Image (cartoon, rainbow, N blue to C red):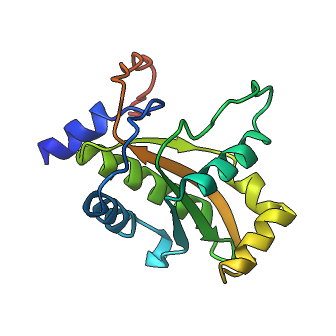
Amino acid sequence: MKSTIDDIISRRSIRKFKDEQISDTELKSILRAGTYAPTGAGRQSPKIIVIQDENKIKEFSKWNAEYFPNVPDGFDPFYSAKTLLIVLADSEIPTYVEDGSSVLSVLVNAAHALGVGSCWIHRARDEFASDKGKELLKEWNIPETFEGIGHVVLGYPDEEPIAAPRKEDYIYYVD
């Protein structure tokens, strides 16, 4: 139990990765953990899309950057990571946003527990609400009711970020 708490407290978003693909064993463990994330009424509304093809990741990165305000030329919102996970969830399930967010949280924490760096990246909702996103869903045989919740990039960390101090009023007790 203590190691789980320690992992959650020590996890950081990684934005600089080594030029090396994570192992299949690590990837499968991270994905398996993601499938055990809590979901509303146990409905398991999310799907996890895995992309490890470098060119496809670059395409998705460029697409994602289109939704990033004031992005500098050449900015890579996926930080040259070798693995991209996209979490989608079925909007017909009332808790789909929370379900997908739960999966994203478990994925980043599972990665950290294995020594794999990760970063949760936004703008998947914008991507998959677009015509291009709807076409991808169709191509992947995923119903159009699925919406983008977020991305997780994975790789071996090439940095050791330090945690920002926690704000004093983060926790508030009510008597």
Q: Is residue 59 shown above or below 166?
A: below
Q: Is residue 170 shown above or below 89?
A: above
Q: Residue at x 84, y 60 (%)?
A: 130
Q: Which residue reaches farthest left?
A: 2
Indicate left or right for 112 with 85 as reference.
Answer: left
The x, y position of residue 12, in whole percent, is 38, 32
Task: Determine which quarter of the picture holds residue 8.
Answer: top left
- In this view, the residue in front, 164 or 55, is 55
Q: Residue at x 63, y 75 (%)?
A: 93
Residue 145 visible in this rendered orientation of the protein:
no
- In this view, the residue in front, 174 or 8, is 8
Residue 125 visible in this rendered orientation of the protein:
yes
Indicate left or right for 42 with 71 as reference.
Answer: left
Q: Residue at x 36, y 24 (%)?
A: 159
The x, y position of residue 85, in whole percent, is 51, 57
Q: Which residue reaches farthest right?
A: 131
Indicate left or right for 87 with 5 as reference.
Answer: right
